Amino acid sequence: MTSTTTVLAACLCGSNSHPISFPKSSLPVPVHLCHCDTTRHVSGLLCSSYVPIPDAPFPVTSLTQYHSSPEVTRYFCSTCGAPMFVKVRGSQPEADRLEVATGAKKH
Ligand SMILES: [Zn+2]
């Protein structure tokens, strides 16, 4: 029996795709909804939703980074502009977390 389930996070144009494995014991995963002013202005939406990725970090160097605050870095596709990840700096380096945009899940 497989102890993980893997989803593929991909942008609209297909330039970026990242498989992400979640331990089945972590399902259902918590969803983080954000309605802050920064999120609204960077996305153009009333809110956005992200899921923390276990075992982060992993390579996201193919994406463009934008530091929207000292604590938050947003990653998006340079071609289609799709937001894909957000990195939130914790109080300690080991507390940093990477989250994937829920809409990036490829079906
Ligand atoms: Zn793209």
Image (cartoon, rainbow, N blue to C red):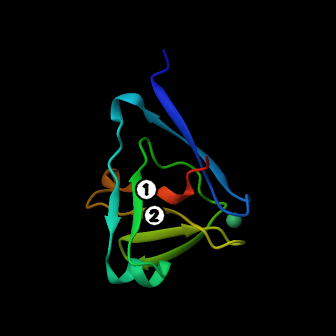
Q: Nearer the viewer, residue 46 or 79?
A: 46
Q: Which amino acid lies under the numbered mark 2 shown in the image of this protein?
A: Val
Q: Secondary structure at mark 2?
A: strand
Residue 27's image quarter? top left
Q: Secondary structure at mark 1?
A: strand
Please say if the residues under marks 2 and 1 sit with CB atoms less than 8 Å apart.
yes
The image shows residue 16, relative to residue 39, as above or below, that is above
The percent coordinates of residue 20 (x first, y second) are: 53, 42
The image shows residue 96, relative to residue 73, as above or below, that is above
**How packed is label 2: few (under 14 Cα within 10 Å), some, or many (20 or more)?**
many
Q: CA distance from mark 2 to mark 1?
A: 5 Å
Q: Which residue appears at 34% of the width and 29% of the height?
A: 25
Please state if 70 lies on the left or on the right of 85 as rendered: left
The percent coordinates of residue 105 (x first, y second) are: 55, 51
Q: Which residue appears at 67% of the width and 61% of the height?
A: 62
Dot 2 or dot 1: first in sequence order is 2
Identify residue for label 1: 99
Q: Which amino acid lies under the numbered mark 1 shown in the image of this protein?
A: Glu
Please state if 40 lies on the left or on the right of 60 as rendered: left
Classify mark 2 as within 8 Å of ligand 1 or not, answering yes or no.
no
Classify mark 1 as within 8 Å of ligand 1 or not, answering yes or no.
no
Q: Nearer the viewer, residue 95 or 79?
A: 79
> Which circle marks residue 32 in the picture?
none
**How packed is label 1: few (under 14 Cα within 10 Å), some, or many (20 or more)?**
many
Please state if 14 lies on the left or on the right of 26 as rendered: right
The percent coordinates of residue 48 (x first, y second) are: 41, 68
Q: Which residue appears at 43% of the width and 62% of the height?
A: 87
The image shows residue 1, relative to residue 97, as above or below, that is above
Residue furthest out toward the left:
91
> Which circle marks residue 86 in the picture?
2
Residue 89's image quarter? bottom left
The image shows residue 14, relative to residue 107, as above or below, that is below
